[in-house]
Image (spheres, grey):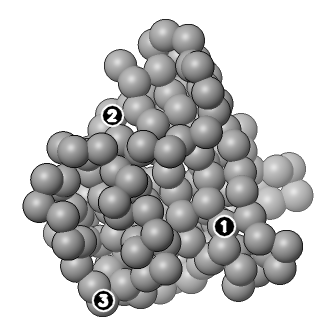
């Protein structure tokens, strides 16, 4: 099993946090992992992306230039990274924010209105975890227990009150179909 994931969006959308959850979940499941954040100097509102590799074998480079999976949480990210996805790869788009469709026909595309789903369920600001839930549903990159533990491990002590909301957001992403 090997998954090269690229998460991309604006700073403040939880891109790096989501990558950390995926990395911890893979690690807790005994996989080899790498997590490489990248963001512009302006942080909130600027660009943010995160490369995550989860593999049963050694990882040669933490940089994901040809992702198996792309999570695009805004239009600039979809436009920038769509062509980098490997043939037969997966692109998950937050269709609440991105009104364009994936142009490529050699990849699988999922349009999930994550921002709207989060907002409609009282989880404003948790579209990233809705997307994480869909990622898990589609890839099963680790066991469900490791995924839940990855969420718990990623939330800092001062934000433990957000644990249940994060888990709820993930469930919404897993249960929603496009």
| Image location (x, y in percent) of residue 153 | 71, 38
| Residue shown at 18% from the left, 44% from the top | 88
Near mark 1 (Cα within 10 A), the count class, few <14, some 14-19 or many ≥20, is many
| Image location (x, y in percent) of residue 17 | 67, 55
| Closer to the camera in the image, 1 or 30 | 1
Check disc 1 and report its element: helix, strand or loop: strand
- Picture disc at residue 48: 1
- Picture disc at residue 140: 2
Q: Nearer the viewer, mark 1 or mark 2?
A: 1
| Residue shown at 74% from the left, 64% from the top | 39
Q: Upstream in the sequence, badge 2 or badge 3?
A: 3
In the rendered view of the protein, which quadrant contains the N terminus?
A: top left
Near mark 2 (Cα within 10 A), the count class, few <14, some 14-19 or many ≥20, is few
- Picture disc at residue 57: none
The residue pinned by badge 3 equals 99
Give the CA distance from mark 2 to mark 3: 27 Å
In the shown orientation, is residue 154 left or right of residue 21? right
| Image location (x, y in percent) of residue 56 | 45, 13
| Closer to the camera in the image, 126 or 162 | 126
| Residue shown at 37% from the left, 84% from the top | 98
Residue found farthest to the left: 105
Check disc 3 and report its element: helix, strand or loop: loop
Q: Upstream in the sequence, badge 1 or badge 2?
A: 1
**Mark 3 and 1 residues: CB-CB less than 8 Å, in contact?**
no
């Amino acid at each position: 099993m090997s998954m090269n994931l690229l998460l991309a969006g604006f700073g403040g959308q939880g891109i790096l946090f989501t990558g950390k959850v995926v990395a911890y979940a893979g690690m807790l499941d005994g996989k080899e992992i790498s997590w490489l954040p990248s963001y512009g100097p302006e942080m909130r509102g600027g660009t943010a992306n995160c490369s995550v590799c989860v593999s049963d074998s050694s990882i040669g480079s933490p940089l994901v230039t040809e992702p198996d999976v792309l999570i695009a949480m805004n239009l600039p990210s979809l436009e920038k990274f769509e062509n980098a996805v490997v043939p037969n790869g997966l692109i998950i788009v937050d269709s609440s924010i991105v009104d364009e469709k994936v142009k490529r026909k050699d990849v699988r595309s999922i349009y999930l209105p994550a921002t709207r789903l989060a907002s409609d369920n009282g989880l404003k600001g948790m579209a990233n975890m809705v997307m994480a839930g869909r990622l898990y549903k589609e890839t099963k990159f680790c066991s469900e227990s490791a995924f839940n533990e990855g969420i718990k491990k990623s939330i800092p002590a001062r934000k433990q009150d957000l644990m249940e909301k994060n888990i709820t957001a993930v469930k919404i992403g897993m249960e929603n179909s496009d």
